[in-house]
Image (cartoon, rainbow, N blue to C red):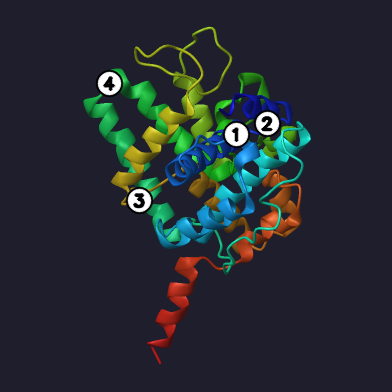
Amino acid sequence: MFEEFDRYLNQQDRSQLTIRGYLADLKAFGTWFQQTNGEALSPVDVTPSDIKEYRQYLLTVERAKAATINRRLAALSAYLNWAVQSGQIEKNPAAGIRSVQQVNQGPRYLDRKQQFALQRAVEKELQIARLRYPKRWAARQRDCAMVVFLLNTGLRLNEAVSLKLEDVQLTDRKGIVWVRQGKGGKQRVVPLNLDARNVLRDWLNVRPEDGTDFIWIAVDGEQEQALSSRSVQRALTRIGRQAGLPTLTPHMLRHSFAKNLIDSGIGLEKVASLLGHSSLNTTRIYVTPNQTDLERAVEQIAQY
C-alpha cells in the first residue's frame, strides 16, 4: 500500500529511522481505517472527519500520549501531502486538524548517579568476561566500548555504526571522529575526550582484521560485517540491566552527553554543533526540565 510513498521518502533523503516510523504509523492508521469504515485505506477515501475521529480514538481509546498522537498525525499528513503532490487528491484532509497540546519536557537522560552505575557495570562486565568468557572477550570489549563511546560523543546510533577506520584520528592527547552520514546529509567533526579515546583504542587493539573497514564489527562466529543497530541495542539492554537501567537506549546516552555539556556551562551553539543540530531550537530541549527534574523540584518543598 505504501511502496510508492516509501520510494518518495527515500528520494527526499529522509533517514531510515524516520521512514520506518512513518510507515509503521501509517499501517496503524490503515488498520483503524479498515476496521472503522469497512474498506481499505486509499488517499482519495480519507476525509477530515476520518482524521478527527482517529485523533479522538487515539486520545480516548488507546489513551496515547500527546507526542505519540502528534507523531502519527504528522506521518498521516506527510502521506496525504504526497498524495496531493502526486495528483491523487486535490487537498490534504489533515491540513486543518489540530495537534494535541502538551507542556514540553526535556528528554530522558542519565543523571550522574546513573552514569556512575553504568560505568561500574561496564567495568564489571569486562572483569567477568576476562575470567568466564575468554572466547567472547572481543565482543564484550566491543560492547562496553560502544556504551562509553556513545555516552562521550553524543553520536546517533546510525552515525556510530556507519563509522569507518578512516573516519577516526587518534593521538595520545587528541582524537576526532568525522561523521560523514549525519542526519539530513550533514557532516561534522566531533572531538574525542579522554574516555572516548581510551575505549576506542582498547577496542581497536582487539578488533579482528576481517577485511571490512567499519570500526564496529560483528565477531565471535557471527557474520563478520558492520555491527547492526539491533546488536548494539541488545548490548545496551544487557549492560543497562546490570546497572539498574533496563530501558537504556542509544538516544538516552546522546541526551546524557548533551545534558552533561549544558550542566558544565557549555553554550548552546557549541552543543548544537557537536550534536549536529541545524537549529538552536532543537538544542534548547536540554535546558527544558524533564520529568525527573520536576519530581526533584516538588520533593524539595517537603523539606521545608
Q: Earlier in the sequence, mark 2 or mark 4?
A: 2
3D distance between C-alphas at marks 2 and 4: 45 Å
Residue depicted at x 48% and y 21%: 205
Q: For the residue labelled by badge 3, is the local secondary structure a helix, a strand or a loop?
A: loop
- SS under mark 1: helix
Q: Viewer-nearest of labels 3 and 1? A: 1
User: Mark 1 sits on what residue?
Assistant: 19
Q: Position of residue 69 (x, y in %)?
A: 53, 55
Label 4 is placed on what type of residue? Pro
Secondary structure category for the residue under label 4: helix
Of circles 2 and 4, the one toward us is: 2
Query: How far apart in space, not on screen, are marks 3 and 2 (Cα)?
Result: 35 Å
**How many residues crowd around disc 4 within 10 Å: few (fewer than 14), some, or many (20 or more)?**
few
Residue ID for mark 3: 245
Q: Which circle's residue, 4 or 3, is located before the other in the chain?
A: 4
Amino acid bearing label 2: Leu
Give amino acid for label 3: Leu
Dots 3, 1 in contact, CB < 8 A: no
Q: Position of residue 144 (x, y in %)?
A: 41, 35
Using the image, determine if residue 205 lies above or below residue 175: above
Image quarter (top left, top right, bottom left or bottom right) of the C terminus: bottom left
Q: Are marks 4 and 1 in contact (CB under 8 Å)?
A: no
The quarter of the image holding the N terminus is top right
The answer to whether residue 227 is left or right of residue 42 is left
Alpha carbon distance from label 2 to label 1: 7 Å
Which residue, given by chain and number where applicable, does mark 2 sit on? 9
